[in-house]
Image (cartoon, coloured by chain):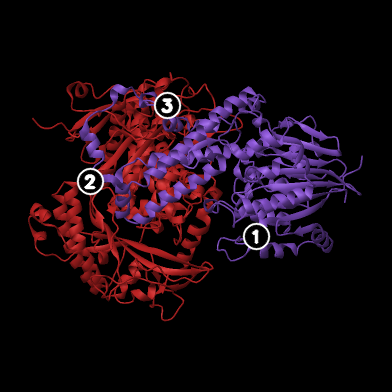
Amino acid sequence: MDTPSHRTLRGYAFDPSLSQRLDTHRINQVYYKVPWETIDYSDGTIRGEYVEIIDYDPSISKFYESINFDEKAILANDGLDPSESNPKFHQQMVYAVVMTTIKNFERALGRKIMWSTRKLDYNPEKGKKKYEDYVDRLRIYPHALREANAYYSPLKKALLFGYFHSNPVDQKDQMPGTLVFTCLSHDIIAHETTHAILDGLHRYYNEPTNPDVLAFHEAFADIVALFQHFSFPDVLKHQIASTRGDLTQQNLLGELAQQFGVAIGGHGSLRNAIGSINENTGVWERKQPDPSEYQNTLQPHDRGSILVAAVFDAFLSIYERRVADLNRIASNGTGILPLGELHPDLVNRLSTEASKTSQHILYMCIRALDYCPPVDITFGDYLRAIITADTDLIAEDVYAYRLAFIEAFKKRGIYPSGVRSLSSESLKYPTIKIKEENNGLIKIVADFLRMYANIVAYHPKREAIYEITYGAISGSINTHMKQLIGYEFSKRITGLHQRINVKFTQSREFKELTGLIFGEDGAEFGIRNSRTYPRWASFSIQNLRVVSRVGPNGNKLNQVVFSIIQKSGVIIENDKVKRVEIPDRDKPPKLNPGETYYIYKGGCTLILDLDSRKLKYAIKKPLIVFPKNRRPSRIPELNTEDIEKQFKYIYETNVMTMSEFQRYFSAAVDYNALEPFAMLHQH
Amino acid sequence: MEEIKDVEIRMYRAGTGDCFVLKFFSDTSEIFTMMIDGGTWSGTKKELQVIVKDLKNYVGNKIDLLVITHEHKDHVYLFSACEELFTNDFDVDEVWMAWSEDDQDETVKEWKEKYGQKKRALALASERIDKGIKNQNVISQLKNGFQGEKVVNRFKNFASSLNDFKALHFSVDKKKKYKGGLKGMEVVKNQISKDNIRYCKPGNIEKISKLEGVNFYILGPPLSIDAIKDHGRTAEEGDLYDHNEILRRSDSFSAAITNTNSSDNISPFDPSYYSNRTSIKKYYNDETEAWRTIDLDWLVSGAGNLALRVNSGINNLSLAMAIEFEDSKKVMLFPGDAEFGSWKSWHQIDWEETGAKKKHLTEDLLNRTVFYKVAHHLSHNGTAKEKGLKMMKSSDLVAMATLDFKKISSNWKSTMPNRGILKDLINQTRGRLIIMNEEDLFYDFDEKVPISERIKDERKRLTDKEKSKFNASYKEHKLYKQYKLDVTKN
């Protein structure tokens, strides 16, 4: 018999608190359908392909018994009954939501997701030759903290969930002192999982180089959690019915972490994408977009909620447009629906539209990640990525999705820098046109990447994908993998890193395109020289991935995407770049009083079309610029403007947004970077 | 009875921490001597004795009124370090403390008991972290990772910061074990005071017979949340303080830390769910996977939050008062280390009278403040902005801040001074901000502009008359800085 395609597991749609409310208890239990996989229980852990759940509670030094999903009784019942007092159900809930979130990402991206690698203390001169380790599974600790906190630890590649005693303002909402488990909240689990997935895609998004970066991490994690609400049909119908199809009213779909929000002494859910309860009147109000908010809000969660509201707003306006005809039919053209409950058929139709729209929006948001710069992301960059990714796949924008996004961002004062107008055409990144002779160089790289894409396509195992990708970049590949792959790569190959080095050094055009230095002038810009090519500037290649998607009209997208990162060491005095100094691991730079050493990361995401073998987009955060008003204009200069802006943000503004916890316990700027989410999520 | 003309405010320079003496003068003579707190972060007995001897000499071994704002080392350490000096040949007529120090009061007793448990938990957690960061296997594996040295230092830095919090709050024995409350507080309660402690509640207006026309408005600490709720308001997160409320968030953490019996008592689940399989322990404790273990992390998260909660809880229990001179309407504000939650509650006190122009009396008092003892050493949460500093509108405003970078926990330097508050204070006082020690303090982030220079610059905005008056009233000495405040009508 074939293995089943899915495993069905019961869980909460939101969190346990909604099972105790008369109006929601019926819809709060849902069936999560996660892809079937073989799970290893032999060590007493739950170990699948992507995650391993270890239910260890360090506060009492105890391990809890693990659930075995494959036990007959559990299998036949779609898992355990939801229960707050059974740790095995907690494991089930976490597993179900984490896997659902992963599945959503993989569907949208069209490829397997990878966790971020564990970077090692790389120091080849001292015999530490390994740069990073592959991490096969995200580790999950459902009962790791005794605090109102849960976080993703990039250091441990783990999710840590906490539990705590509830402390509500109003005893009507919750019994004080009840235990609240963050690992039972769909929203919290989905949020933390998204942090981990995003870290696997863009590891530098942990570094707050501008006020948007951490806010983006938070916002994105919220967006995923929010739109997953729409994938529960009963919840959706219930909410559509109770709002009479008007989702701009207060409803559960736009709320995040109800139980947690009340338990820490709030008035309702932790965050809400549509509106909130007015503290003075106690009445729920829809939030109006306020462009000044984006200017003045710096705390990452608060700033992130501006982006969440923008995306949700885009969703609402598309939904409204999509159901306009249904509303006309149901209201006999008056636009005013008859009093009383909506007809169940209408509820069904509205729900279908809402569900479809929400999935489109979620996928647009996820796909855009492939079109983002590798460092220093801003909300504006993200808007451009959304528009570009969507235009690439869907040429004709029938329901004006892109316009809805642009409108929603505009209303909140989020403008990308360097665009002439806020039209879809100018927001889309321009397609690159390079000289014919350089196109020849690109074609050689493209042929190589075609081969890479072909090999990856036939190796579904994630570890194999990692090894092949690592080999394709570095040119070195271990024997085990050689056997596994079998052909072309078993010969000695020239990796992408070397190819870029050789090809891009040949023309100045590539420097302009990427804003990075290739070839001999590295030292002039504070860039270390490469170990392999001692005369050429060093850079690293990250995140090589195949983007293979099919659009709604059957059009195919065949792209390979990768990012190039380059570091430049600068010495700053009085907020100005004074001179460059090549970073040296063993020798900290000599500084005069008043000087600070700063390492700036420039980067560029390159998108290469495999069909035409052309470089399509270069989305960059340049390390060098070519001043237009200077002659000769083709001599590059260090991008001091951005470096200084970034430095000032990190050392001044960012300090102001630190939490009390950060101020007292990890005041040094770089300590925060180590566990960015642990600090952010303190409540 | 003679009318008070001026008050000499002397800030002793014992180190970051408060030790003030106020002398009230009439035209002809010294009428009344008041002392507010006696603390510092650090200092040897020898150094501190010099200060205390000078103080005794200055007051003629006699204080009319001693005010202890709250039980933190930087407010009471002198009393334990120089116990003999304070308990011999030193007279205190009356002692004032916050209502929350009244050990006879049943609610206070209950609260103190709970608070003691939290402090004990903090001490135990800190011990465990100290021990945890000595686990060689974990440490060496952490070091193997990217920026491993930094990762390890982060833990060490955390442990040291936590130890500072301990020192601020309670006594420890030689093995760093929790011993009880701060000794300085006991010295005041049991030896210096002679059963003459008055416990002050917000809304009280205290008077002193020797000081005619002087009113002491008690602003804080706020009463429990229930009292505030009675006025029809609901609490907002982090604003109003039931002093247990905020600590309750650490309940599950401190229960686990202080538990000495079987873990079944504190387990969130029935013990039948425990797994006894050795394989899972082996898997978790696998030598090569030590970098993924979480035995330190839960302590860091829990203990850090607990320390902050204990800390701001105590700060908000500061006895805060406004001293008003009826004739001139001038006000001196001594808030202890009150944080935002306390400041906010002052505006909800049900005073019997309203202020000028029908303002809430607290706002009116702030409007008339001419002297402000900066709360919590210029930290970001010490001075409320909208509900505090912005309301101090007097053009005569002078402020004193008890910050000394030479004598402070290194972990505190990142929180003090707060640039925003510093900027506002220097601006509003036009440079009449007197800081205990300006050395190593800078006005800006780049540490280019020393505070002293900025203050000098700002004083150029004073009129000639103001300038000469300030210079005549201000006195600087190795052991103290002093300002003579004119409390008559201008």
Give the percent coordinates (x, y) of residue B381: 60, 45
- The residue under the point 38% across, 76% down is A524
Residue toward you, A197 or B58: B58
Vertical placement of residue A246 versus A677, above or below: above
Give the percent coordinates (x, y) of residue A550: 23, 47
The reply, left or right, for residue B80 in relation to residue A540 is: right
The reply, left or right, for residue B486 in relation to residue B241 is: right
Residue underneath mark 1: B438
> For the residues marked 2 and 1, what is the alpha-carbon distance in whole angstroms?
54 Å
| Helix, strand or loop under label 3 | strand
Image quadrant assignment for residue A632? bottom left
Dot 3 amino acid type: Leu
Query: What color does chain B have in the rendering?
Result: purple
Residue underneath mark 2: A136
Q: Is residue A680 visible?
A: yes
- The residue under the point 59% across, 56% down is B405
- The residue under the point 56% across, 30% down is B244
